[in-house]
Amino acid sequence: GMVRFTRALTGGCIASLSICSSLSTAAAFSFCPPARGMTTGLHLSHRLGLGLVGTLPRQAGGFEAAKVRAAAQGATQGAMQSRACSAAAAQGSVDIEQFSCLQDNYGFLIHDRATGATAAIDTPEVAPILAALDRRGWKLSHILNTHHHGDHTGGNAELKRLTGCTIVGPSGEQSKIPGIDTALNGGDTFSLGETKVEVMDVGGHTIGHIAYHLPGAGAAFVGDALFSLGCGRMMEGSYPQFHASLQRLVGLPGATLVHCAHEYTVANGRFALSLEPGNPALQARVKQVAALREAGVPTVPTTLEQELATNPFLRNASPEIIAALGLPANASPLDVFAAARAAKDRF
């Protein structure tokens, strides 16, 4: 059948309390009454338009996948914090539920309103995922793994046993993804219900790492590839691979909401300031982050536009960063990225 999905956001935000970036979409922040089992709630809603595109073949189990060429490109039980992000449209809309897991992971659920299909982005911890499903009244249909690390796949087997869900993950790490049913590569496109999902190759943290981009919701789920004010430690890949991966993410619309898998922003901000203390946007961002964390509010999601202005791993042409790393003024973007990543490892 036809795949329906909403148009991309024309603005984004990462804010709370009275702190909010400029918005060109209908968006609002408010503290919500705590959900059952939760101590804090934050609600963000976006109104989105609706469009129609293409047709993709339907496969058994409600999972639709078409390997087509891309057109351009993770609360412990009794959770600590929660943020619900609802992207609503007349039809074919998605809801995104975010919650804390383990020590500093975030879990995410994506719910296609039109069909009820619901996917967990990675499975850092079973109890918070089940609690979020129960709180929203959703049934898990899919797990979308970004990479093979245990804090991203640790709940696969139990959740599949409890729900019968389909597990999707990176082809390059297929043998390391527990219970995987469908292996995908960067450039593949599939539908979660009626929601279009684009798979992106973001290898570097791990060799086969992938990200999931929902163009209609203006959202990307990037695992450990890109963080707010940082990027993942390069554990398996190479500097050229990782740099190229981040450049693919940079190619997304600036308003894209970037859902990272960890709350690392405060520490990342300290490193960023060590390289670019003269960046006014970074100075303001670090103050904003401190206020958010003092209030117990997540700094995730961020926006790509915000990362381009403040994240040192995406600012390879900054003369201040190049000088702080002791590189020649004409250093290549790859050399700047490699030096910055190595410096962060030592920081």
Image (cartoon, helix red, strand yellow):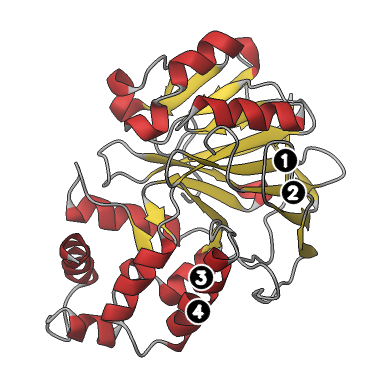
Work out how far the residue at label 3 is from the one at label 4, CA to CA, in angstroms.
Answer: 5 Å
Is any atom of residue 224 visible in this view?
yes
* Residue highlighted by disc 1: 94
Query: Where does residue 290 sit, x and y in percent of width and height?
Result: 50, 72
Q: Amino acid at mark 4?
A: Lys
Discs 4, 1 touching: Cβ within 8 Å: no
> Between 281 and 202, which is closer to the camera in this rendering?
281
**Closer to the observer: label 4 or label 2?**
4
Kindly identify the residue that appears in the image at 74 percent across and 48 percent down: 87
Answer whether labels 1 and 2 touch (C-beta < 8 Å): yes
Please tell me which residue lies in front, 248 or 83.
Answer: 83
What mark, if any, has residue 87 been given in the picture? 2
Residue 281 is situated, as x and y percent measured from the top left of the image, at 48, 83
Query: Which one is earlier in the sequence, the residue at label 3 or at label 1?
Result: 1
- Count residues near mark 3 (Cα–Cα under 10 Å), then give few for <14, some for 14-19, many for 20+: many
**Which mark lies nearer to you, 3 or 1?**
3
Quadrant including the C terminus: bottom left
Q: Earlier in the sequence, mark 1 or mark 2?
A: 2
Q: Which mark is residue 47?
A: none
Looking at marks 4 and 2 on the same chain, the residue that comes earlier in the sequence is marked by: 2
The location of residue 75, given as percent across then percent down, is 54, 39
Local SS, label 3: helix
* Mark 1 secondary-structure assignment: strand
Mark 1 and mark 2: span between their CA atoms? 5 Å
Name the one closer to the observer, 72 or 226.
226
| Residue type at numbered disc 2 | Ala
Please say if the residues under marks 3 and 4 sit with CB atoms less than 8 Å apart.
Answer: yes
Type of the residue with mark 3:
Val
Image quarter (top left, top right, bottom left or bottom right) of the N terminus: top right
Residue ID for mark 4? 287
Q: Mark 3 sits on what residue? A: 289
